[in-house]
Image (tube, rainbow, N blue to C red):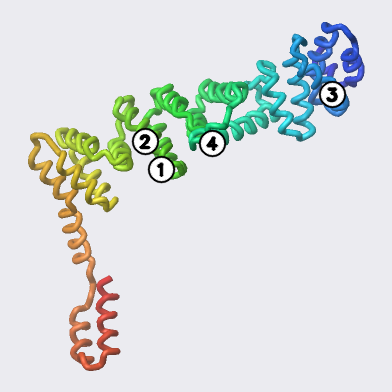
Amino acid sequence: MSVSVLKSQSAQGILSMMEEDSVEMKIYALYKLNLIVDQTWPEIANHLNQLDALTSDENFPERRLAASVASKVFYHLQEYEYCVRLALEAGDYFEIMERSKYVETVISKCIDMYISKRVQLSEGDKSVVIDPKLEDIVNKMFERCFIDKEWYQAIGLALEARRLDVVERAIVEDSKDIEKKLNYTYKIAQDVIDSKEFRTDVLNLLVKLYERGDGKVDYYNLTKCQFFLRVPEAAAKILSNLLNMDPEYLTAYQIGFDLVETENQSFLNSINDHLSGDKHLRIEALSKILTNQIPRKLGLQFMKKNNHTDMLLLKNLMNDVGVKNSITHGACVWANAIMNS
């Protein structure tokens, strides 16, 4: 019988088969109900107790099918807690590859539950237990992302769920966009992740993947990772290697300027102490950047070049006002400060 025919008929005839003692008849009825549940769920809703009984009966061979039908009915009733619980019981009858509102809703609820439990576990709550069926659905969702090549969605979900194994797989699975995926993960780690411990774990993973050399290495982000991980020796090694390369040594200079802006002089001094190589002039130039000699000099040059203060006007103002009147003298000082700001 075609689905189009089933859509136009009532479910009462099929539901009456559920009253039979024959197990085969009940299974047949469940298969038919599973096809028309979206159209006839108001009628099936009156038999939820019977479906629940079949779901709970471990001796019933198609208890998962009964759970699938009941889950869809609860979805239409907007009873999402029961809907998700029964979807987990449905096993393979919950077709995660199906593009329907029901499937997307269940997946969304499952992901929210899974993320909440994973965060609790990562924060040290050992009383939390994750249902293997829940984890199975989430893992299937990740697989769907990989099949559809939705790498960024997989990375985002995996970071929320504290699943570094999935993050790593999503990054290296397709070598075409490794650099973009690494940068995307780095941005989320810096802007979104609140947990310091988990952010450190993510940055350690990124360092491992950057150093693996799959794709073009982003030395800027790699060095920033080393900065946030407080590993000056590793940062110094990266910069030393860049200094020995043409024209990459210019990148080392730019990274040096970026690090100076962090205003962590102890970290910069430690990098400076660990610089090595035979390009002594380049090392000396980078050392002057890290010790803030060149940035300070360039800053003063910029301010001097862009200083449009009328010094003659200030001089005449001071001569006319004098130093006896404290109020007018203070006004001259403020005028000097504003004109040089």
Residue 97 rendering spot, x and y as whole percentages = 62, 21
Residue mark closest to the camera, 2 vs 3: 3
Measuring 66% from the left and 19% from the top, which residue is drawn there?
A: 95
Q: Is 37 placed above or below 218 here?
A: above
Residue nearer the viewer, 31 or 339: 31
Which sits earlier in the primary sequence, circle 2 or circle 3? 3
User: What residue sits right under mark 2 in the picture?
Assistant: 203
Secondary structure type for disc 4: helix
Neighbor class of circle 1 (other Cα within 10 Å; few <14, some 14-19, many 20+) is some
Per the model, the C-alpha gap separating discs 1 and 3 is 50 Å
Percent x, y of residue 329: 25, 87
Give how far apart the Cα atoms at labels 4 and 2 are.
Answer: 21 Å
SS label for mark 2: helix
Pointer 3: what residue? 49
Residue 184, position in %: x, y? 42, 36
The residue indicated by pointer 1 is: 190
- Can residue 40 be seen in this snapshot? no
Q: How many marks?
A: 4
In this rendering, position of residue 247 left or right of residue 134: left
- The amino acid marked with disc number 3 is Asn
Estimate how packed mark 4 is, as few (under 14), some (14 to 19) or many (20 or more) residues with alpha carbons within 10 Å. some
Q: Measured from the top left, where is residue 1 in percent x and y?
A: 83, 10
The part of the image, by quadrant, that contains residue 179 is top left
Q: Earlier in the sequence, mark 1 or mark 3?
A: 3
Label placed on residue 120: 4
Three-letter amino acid code at the position of disc 1? Gln
C-alpha gap between disc 2 and disc 3: 51 Å
